[in-house]
Image: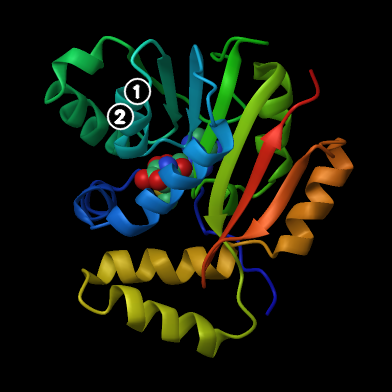
Amino acid sequence: MKRIPEPIELMDEKAQAKAYAEADFREPNQLFLDRLLALMGDRAPNHALDLGCGPADITLHVARHWHDCRVDGLDGAEAMLAHGRRLLQRHPATEARVNLICDTLPSALLPQRAYDLIFSNSLLHHLHNPDILWQTIQSTAIPGAAIFIMDLRRLNSPQAVESLVQHYAANEPQILQRDFRASLCAAFTPDEVQQQLNERGLTTLSVHNLSDRHLSISGFLPG
Ligand SMILES: C[S@@+](CC[C@H](N)C(=O)[O-])C[C@H]1O[C@@H](n2cnc3c(N)ncnc32)[C@H](O)[C@@H]1O
């Protein structure tokens, strides 16, 4: 199936952000966190970056897991970050270590060579030019940084897309079903992601299939 890019990269519609922030993503978010923790082993990051953090659920979990870590979350959609700020306010002990940044990638607001962990869930498929993610990682990570990216992966046919929408989102609001369908069509295949990494020289990162609809890109930058 040919890739159909997202019509708009950012999720800045109020109703869209609300539906996304209120949806139940516990299963994929837990998968994300389990794989991130497995990658990190005994390492505890000092300064982490969540790219396309949306309503900051994963951002918050990461900050709560590593108590000494500062976590920056970047998203270009103010409508999404508003949900993130409200979530953080409910966790005052963690809030001071989390900094939400409203900006669109590529971002001049991010510090260069600063982060020892960069993670991202479900951003890559939104990007019309996916190289922006890999460029950002190369310019903002320190040598040896841990990288964990999870995203949807593209399926073989429109029928396969429809069957996943029905399986995972049949009871969700129409707007969430619409976005899930668009995301599955905009997602990259593992081979396309591997090619993106090769073109950037990110050869220490590897691509894996994680579930019926997810892939991951993970590893450490050269030290
Ligand atoms: C599907 S949401 C994922 C949110 C969050 N990572 C999560 O797992 O819940 C994708 C997010 O990426 C943001 N986004 C898309 N393109 C972007 C860009 N070029 N720069 C910054 N954020 C972007 C959208 O606004 C949206 O909030």
Corner quadrant of residue 187: bottom right
Residue 11 or 140: which is nearer the viewer? Answer: 140
Q: Considering the image in quadrants, where does the C terminus appear?
A: top right
* Residue type for callout 1: Ala
- Percent of width and height locating residue 34: 44, 46
**Ligand 1 found in image quarter:** top left
Q: Does residue 91 appear left or right of residue 16 in this picture? A: left
> Residue 32 shows which numbered tag?
none
Q: Is mark 2 within 8 Å of ligand 1?
A: no
| Rendering coords of residue 222 (x, y %) | 81, 24
Image height check: is 164 above or below 48?
below
Name the amino acid, label 2: Leu
Percent coordinates x, y for residue 184 in the rendering: 52, 68
Q: Secondary structure at mark 1?
A: helix
Q: Residue at x 54, y 54 (%)?
A: 151
**Residue at image coords 64%, 50%:** 128
As helix, strand or loop, the secondary structure at mark 2 comes to helix
Mark yes or no: residue 46 visible.
yes
Locate residue 179, reporting x and y percent: 39, 64
User: Who's the residue at 58% across and 54% down the image?
Assistant: 125
Category of crowding for the residue at label 1, using alpha-carbon neighbours closer than 10 angstroms: few (below 14), some (14–19), many (at least 20): many
Q: Is residue 131 left or right of residue 173?
A: right
Residue 10 in view = no
Q: Which residue is mark 1?
A: 63
Q: Is the residue 221 above or below the residue 154 in the image? A: above
Q: Is disc 2 surrounded by few (<14), some (14 to 19) or many (20+) residues within 10 Å?
A: many
The residue pinned by badge 2 equals 60
Quadrant showing the N terminus: bottom right
Q: Residue furthest bottom?
A: 159
Q: CB of mark 1 within 8 Å of CB of mark 2?
A: yes
Of 218 and 16, the residue lying toward us: 218
